[in-house]
Amino acid sequence: MSTAEPPVNTTHVTPSEPLIGPGHTYASVTDKIAAVVLTRPLGIGWLAGFTVTFAFTMLLLVAITWLFTKGVGIWGINIPIGWGFAIVNFVWWIGIGHAGTLISAILFLLNQKWRTSINRFAEAMTLFAVACAGIFPLIHTGRPWMAYYMFPYPSTMGIWPQFRSPLIWDVFAVSTYGTVSLLFWFIGLLPDLATLRDRAKNRIQQIIYGMLSMGWRNSARHWHNYQSAYLLLAGLATPLVLSVHTVVSFDFSIAIVPGWHTTIFPPYFVAGAIYSGFAMVLTLTIPLRKAYGLEDFITMRHLDTMAKVMLATGLIVAYGYFIEFFMAYYSGNKFDVFLAEQRLHGPYRHFYFALILCNILTPQLLWSSKVRRNVPLLFLLSLVINTGMWLERFVIIIISLTRDFVPSAWGRYSATFWDYATLAGTILGLFSMLVFLFVRGLPAIAIAEMRELVHEGHARKEPS
Amino acid sequence: MTEHRARLHGVMAEFDTPEQLLSAARKTREAGYKRVDAYTPFPVEGLAEAIGTRRSWVPLITLAGGLGGGLSGFGLQYWVAAITYPVNIGGRSLNSWPAFIPVTFELTVLGASLFAVVGMLALNKLPQPYHPVFNVDRFATAASTDRFFLCIEARDPKFNLAETARFLQGLNAQHVSEVKDEE
């Protein structure tokens, strides 16, 4: 029966590869993950990375300040292209966030143990992506200081929001998504914050993690309520994540603009969101596991599985592109047919071809297990897919708006320096800076859940 | 609370593995102790039941939050669109309920999630800055890493310091120590 030897787990053998490297115990997983936060000195790599991302965050602030000073005229938007980079970036960022919730909630419900070592990180990515996403619709309104008009509050003017508008649905969907993601993340962190509190090396760490962990003491009664709440949150976040990108796609599909008014949008947006989100998780975890020596926890099996999820969702997205064309011709609606042809032959055709290359053709390499296990190539592919998903949003928004119903309403769009500065300010700036701070401030891997995996025997058998 | 010197919170035993703790917890219940708590660095299946925890209230609280969020969400939209701020657009129905579903859904999820989290914290009586178990040095350093603890509390009617300590020793505990409450 139970031996006095604690952890090294040799009980039931998982199919294929184990999820944790050889010989890990409760203490060793705890030490390794907590050390990144508590003891490891700030390396030159971290400092350099933080400096660069901090500089880009400042660029974002400059771009936004200039925008507030001069107005949205500093951007490339015009009439009829009122939705330029701001909405392209918004949809892209919010989509990236979706993989975090998918990993933490849906894979939890499906009892996929491999999610454990990447869920905390992916949830953090979700929060930071939602933070970046939230900036864009706000600054795009032109008068962001009036943004509170979108919330239902008893104003002295007696006016209320229009609840039949998808843009109001968006406000509720995105703010709920941000809030629930934060709650889910914090609940997951609670036992780990207590672990950091108990291992704190100095008074400051002790106070900070002590306050954040709220006095969590690993009591069985606490765990009992905790597990119940965590499971329920996972169950709530699952339909939520599907609803958020559905609502975002309603911003388009409820409108009558050619290329937007299609029923395929909600499922195809959700699949695209998960596609880009997994790409972003790979973009971040590949350098992270290397830099902090976490290869034992984020194993090749994780990378391989994530690559397979990308391949599957990428095929759903490809199906979506196909159906867009099919329905345009099948409907016989001349505006839809014209728009489909504009994608292939219009002034923005290069974007469309680049999109097909990035999102459909290149990812087919993932069919090969050699590619899925080639870490640098996988990293490169994740960047290609991220670019492809951004191009998809660009194609949807810009091509449709530049080719409306009558030629007199046609236009052209080109982004300005400030458009690019704002985009770079979120990708290389705010988002990356928050990732850098997160990695050193909080445990990037869920420690308590890793101990659970060790207990369940997912560690590799010690070579003997 | 009436005394001003250090009171006794209970007696704590330390175990090597969750299996040992689980069987000790079961024996403790069988021996008739009621005020017992167990501490593990990760959730251990069956342990909460073994120390006599009843079903969690979190699901019911969550349901209440979800119902409250959904009903107030729909109610708000109905009241705004049909009663206080009606906008007549070509005579279309004011209570256009299908258009109210997205916001109703989001607020259902929001209400349920907030209640689940706040309910869980409240049921666990968190935040709680001080608890006597942290006065045990081994607990404060190892309970969140790889040690498993069982505490029989002094308010248990069957509690007797010497006898309870001996009982815990008999369960193959590694260390048995008194837990002082210094408040």
Image (cartoon, coloured by chain):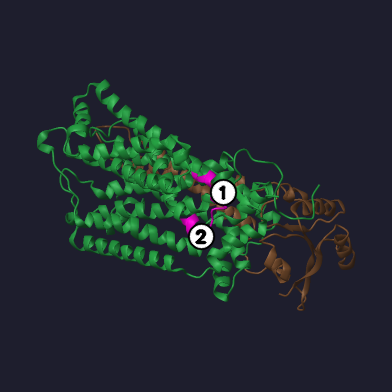
Chain colours: A green, B brown
Tell me the SS state at disc 1.
helix
Which of the marked residues, 2 or 1, is nearer the chain's N terminus?
A: 1
Q: Nearer the viewer, residue B149 or A68?
A: B149
Q: Decide which of B92, A61 is in the foreground and name it.
A: A61
Disc ID at residue A348:
none
Residue in view at x 36 percent, y 50 percent: A152
Q: Is B136 on the left or on the right of A197, as rendered? A: right
> Which quadrant of the view contains residue A204?
bottom right
| Helix, strand or loop for disc 2 | loop
Tell me which segment is drawn in magenta: A288-303
Q: Residue furthest front?
A: A464
Q: Is residue A390 above or below residue B172?
A: above
Q: Is residue A300 magenta?
A: yes
Mark 2: which amino acid? Tyr
Q: Which residue is mark 2?
A: A292
**Number of residues whose C-alpha sits closer than 10 Å to that of mark 2, classed few (under 14), some (14–19) or many (20 or more):** some
Residue B35 included in the magenta stretch of the image: no
User: Which subunit holds the residue at mark 1?
Assistant: A
Can you see residue B105?
Answer: no
Label 2 – label 1 distance at C-alpha:
17 Å
Residue at numbered disc 1: A116
The residue at 77%/78% (across/down) is B5
Question: Is A150 positioned to the left or the right of A72 in the image?
Answer: right
Specify the farthest residue to the bottom.
B5
Q: Does any portion of residue B54 appear in the rendered image? A: yes
Position in image of residue A147 (x %, y %) = 30, 55
How far across and down, in percent of the image, does residue A309 sit? Answer: 46, 38
* Cβ atoms at labels 2 and 1 below 8 Å apart: no
